[in-house]
Structures are given as structure tokens and as C-alpha cells.
């Protein structure tokens, strides 16, 4: 009897796992609008071969440079980076069948140039970073997906030592695994500002800060799946900074700094854009822009969280503003801002290296990639 049960488990478990894995993902693309773009686009990603298809406009909006999907997958939120002091966050309802977006309402971000946003794990709060305004904001979400009044706003203060940076520039905001603390990377101040999050109320309170090395210009930020390590890319210094994270205290500690470009390459006119940890927790990636367009690949020591350089992927990469890895970890999509396309790579699960699938979609100035499951 025991042998029979073991045989049944052997044959049935793969089938159950396969049934839980979607065959496709819907991909939402944030863009800078202009002659080639009218707003937020969508396409399909086939997990069989990494093929991208069915590109279409999902919703019109002025320069939705970053988008975030609600945990219930019924709503999508986007920052409108253009618009000066009147720029803000827009809420959309997602049509479950077609993926098209219907505008619900909007809310001010409190500062100019909102450039990044996330939705907390409970789906009750949107958090956004303002680049031009040098600030961050939290906005409560209603049960119907609409943005509510209230929340919190914090103006960052201080001077910048970075060239051409006169003051603070909030560049990203993220929430930890416990949904208790928010982290806003401020490029202008060389700091990651830490806030305690009350998602039920949609509010934040100042908690602390982490100083990156002078001249780093921290841009984006990513947690390891274990919640114990974190990584931020220095936009100006072309570095990746590894940190330990104390979840109980909401505190970061510097662990390691590693270059994102090969040895011997000059750093002039370079900048990094995005940092992403693989769902397996085995690798971390950073996009290099301008004179050395590439995706830098690093392996993660599973005992210490420290990094080792693996290599760089340059094929088809042109001003890689943002990139993302779909939840199963098989494929990476890279948004080539100046290339006006999004390209697909297969990820080697053993080494982290990337191989082009040869598939792409043409879209004007893509700058954000986000995934949504659409089933079998």
C-alpha cells in the first residue's frame, strides 16, 4: 500500500505543480508618451518559449513612467511623471478578460516628478517617490480601488554633493517582507530614508536612514526573498551595495560594494537604472545605461548574501531603463528606453546568465515592466 501511495505521489505532484503554473503572463508596460506612445501598453508573455505578442494600448495617460499592480490583480496604479507640481498617481480598474484599463480617479503625489510607486502587501496603501520634488508619499486605497484623501507626505531635506544635483531626489520606494517598513532611496542625498508603515491607515512615520557611500546616488532598491538582505544600485557610482536587514528594528547595515561594470571600463557618462533579485534568491541583476548598455549579473552567496560578478549581457540592450523577471523565474524582460522596444531573455537557472529568445515588441520609450497572471 505504501509503495502504491509513493507511486501516486510521484506522478501526481508534477501535474499539480504544472496546474498551478500559468501558461502566460499579461505584461503591463509604462512609457514616456510622445509620437510613439500614448500611455500604458499591454502584451502577452508565453512561458513555453518567452515569446512576446499581442501588444496593444491598455489605457491612455500622460507619461505613466512606472506602474504597480494591486495584489488582488483588479487594479493598477501609475505615476504621471509629467505635469510639474500637479503630477500625481492615477488608479485604474483592470478588465479581467481583456486587460484594458478604466480610469477610476487620481490623487496628488505632493511633489514634482513622481517616478516610482508600489502597492503594499495588504493592498491598502500606494507609496510613491517624487524625483523632482525630492519627497515621498503614501495614499490610502479604498475597497473599490480608488485613491483616498489622507495618507502621509514627507519632504526630504539636505544638500547634495553629487554633480548637477542641488538637493534631494526621491527615486524609488519599497516595502519590506513584513509590510512594516518603507524604504525611499534618495539619489540626491545619498541616503535611503526609512519609514514605519501603517498600511491600515495608509500612513508612514519617519523611522531612520541609511547612508550610502558619498557620491553613490542610490536609485532603486530590492529585498532578497529571505527578507534578511537588501541591495541598492548607485546610479552615479556604477556600484551595487549589499546590505543586511534587521526586520525587527527596521535597520540596514552595509555589507559589500561591488562594481556593475567590468574591470578597466571607465565610469564616465555611465549610469545604472534598475536592480532586481531573482525569485530563487540566487542572483541579482543591475541595468547599466548609456556608454555601456548591459545587464550586469551577480551570484548571491546563500549563506552570507554577498555578491560575486558573473558577467554582462549586452545583446539587444539599449538604454535599459527598467527590467523585470516574471514570477516563475524563467524569463527576464528588458525595457529599452531609447531602443523603443521590450526584449525577452531566458534565464539559466544554474548560472543566472541570459540568452536572448529573439522575441520583442516595439513600443515607444518603455520604462517599466510589470507582470500579471492570466492563467492557463
Image (cartoon, rainbow, N blue to C red):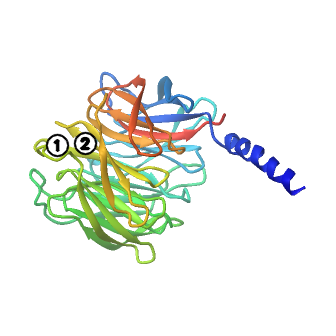
Please say if the residues under marks 2 and 1 sit with CB atoms less than 8 Å apart. yes
**Looking at the picture, how far across and down is residue 42, in whole percent?**
48, 30
Of the 4 image quadrants, the one containing the N terminus is bottom right
Q: Secondary structure at mark 2?
A: strand
Q: State the residue lying farthest toward the right.
A: 1
Left or right, 278 with reference to 376:
left
Can you tell which quarter of the image residue 356 is in? Answer: top left
Give the CA distance from mark 2 to mark 1. Answer: 7 Å
Taking the spot 60% from the left edge, 34% from the top edge, the residue there is: 95
Q: State the residue lying farthest toward the front.
A: 3
**Looking at the picture, how far across and down is residue 218, in whole percent?**
25, 56
Local crowd at mark 2 within 10 Å, few (<14), some, or many (≥20)?
A: many
Left or right, 159 with reference to 93:
left
Label annotation for residue 270: 1
Q: Is residue 82 visible?
A: no
**Looking at the picture, how far across and down is residue 260, in whole percent?**
24, 49
Taking the spot 20% from the left edge, 37% from the top edge, the residue there is: 292
96 over 70 or under it: above or below: above
Labels 2 and 1: the sequence-earlier one: 1
Taking the spot 34% from the left edge, 36% from the top edge, the residue there is: 63
Label annotation for residue 279: none
Judge by depth and name the residue closer to the eye, 189 or 130.
189
Q: Secondary structure at mark 1?
A: strand
Q: Is residue 266 visible?
A: yes
Judge by depth and name the residue closer to the eye, 123 or 223.
223
The residue tagged 2 is: 288
**Looking at the picture, how far across and down is residue 208, in whole percent?**
32, 74
Amino acid at each position: 500500500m505504501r509503495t502504491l501511495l509513493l507511486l501516486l505521489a510521484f506522478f501526481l505532484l508534477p501535474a499539480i505543480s504544472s496546474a498551478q503554473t500559468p501558461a502566460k503572463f499579461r505584461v503591463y508596460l509604462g512609457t514616456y508618451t510622445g509620437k510613439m506612445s500614448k500611455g500604458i501598453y499591454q502584451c502577452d508573455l508565453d512561458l513555453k518559449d518567452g515569446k512576446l505578442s499581442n501588444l496593444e494600448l491598455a489605457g491612455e495617460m500622460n507619461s505613466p513612467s512606472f506602474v504597480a499592480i494591486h495584489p488582488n490583480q483588479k487594479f493598477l496604479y501609475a505615476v504621471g511623471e509629467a505635469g510639474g507640481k500637479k503630477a500625481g498617481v492615477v488608479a485604474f480598474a483592470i478588465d479581467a478578460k481583456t486587460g484594458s484599463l478604466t480610469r477610476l480617479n487620481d490623487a496628488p503625489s505632493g511633489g514634482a516628478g513622481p517616478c516610482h510607486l508600489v502597492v503594499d502587501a495588504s493592498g491598502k496603501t500606494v507609496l510613491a517617490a517624487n524625483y523632482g520634488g525630492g519627497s515621498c508619499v503614501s495614499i490610502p486605497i479604498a475597497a473599490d480601488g480608488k485613491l483616498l484623501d489622507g495618507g502621509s507626505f514627507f519632504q526630504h531635506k539636505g544638500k547634495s554633493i553629487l554633480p548637477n544635483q542641488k538637493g534631494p531626489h526621491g527615486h524609488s520606494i519599497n516595502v519590506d517582507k513584513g509590510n512594516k517598513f518603507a524604504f525611499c532611496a534618495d539619489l540626491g542625498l545619498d541616503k535611503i530614508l526609512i519609514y514605519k508603515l501603517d498600511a491600515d491607515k495608509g500612513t508612514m512615520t519617519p523611522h531612520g536612514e541609511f547612508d550610502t557611500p558619498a557620491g553613490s546616488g542610490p536609485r532603486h532598491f530590492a529585498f532578497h526573498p529571505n527578507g534578511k538582505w537588501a541591495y541598492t544600485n548607485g546610479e552615479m557610482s556604477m556600484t551595487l551595495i549589499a546590505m543586511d536587514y534587521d526586520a525587527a528594528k527596521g535597520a540596514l547595515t552595509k555589507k559589500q560594494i561591488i562594481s556593475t561594470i567590468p574591470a578597466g571600463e571607465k565610469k564616465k557618462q555611465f549610469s545604472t537604472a534598475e536592480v532586481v533579485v531573482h525569485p530563487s534568491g540566487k542572483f541579482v541583476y543591475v541595468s547599466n545605461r548609456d556608454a555601456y548598455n548591459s545587464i550586469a549579473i551577480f551570484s548571491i552567496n546563500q549563506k552570507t548574501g554577498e555578491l560575486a560578478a558573473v558577467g554582462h549581457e549586452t545583446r539587444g540592450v539599449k538604454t535599459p531603463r527598467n527590467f523585470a523577471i516574471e514570477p516563475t523565474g524563467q524569463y527576464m524582460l528588458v525595457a529599452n528606453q531609447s531602443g523603443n522596444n521590450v526584449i525577452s531573455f531566458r534565464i539559466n537557472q544554474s548560472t543566472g546568465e541570459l540568452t536572448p529568445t529573439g522575441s520583442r515588441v516595439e513600443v515607444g520609450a518603455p520604462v517599466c515592466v510589470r507582470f500579471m497572471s492570466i492563467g492557463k
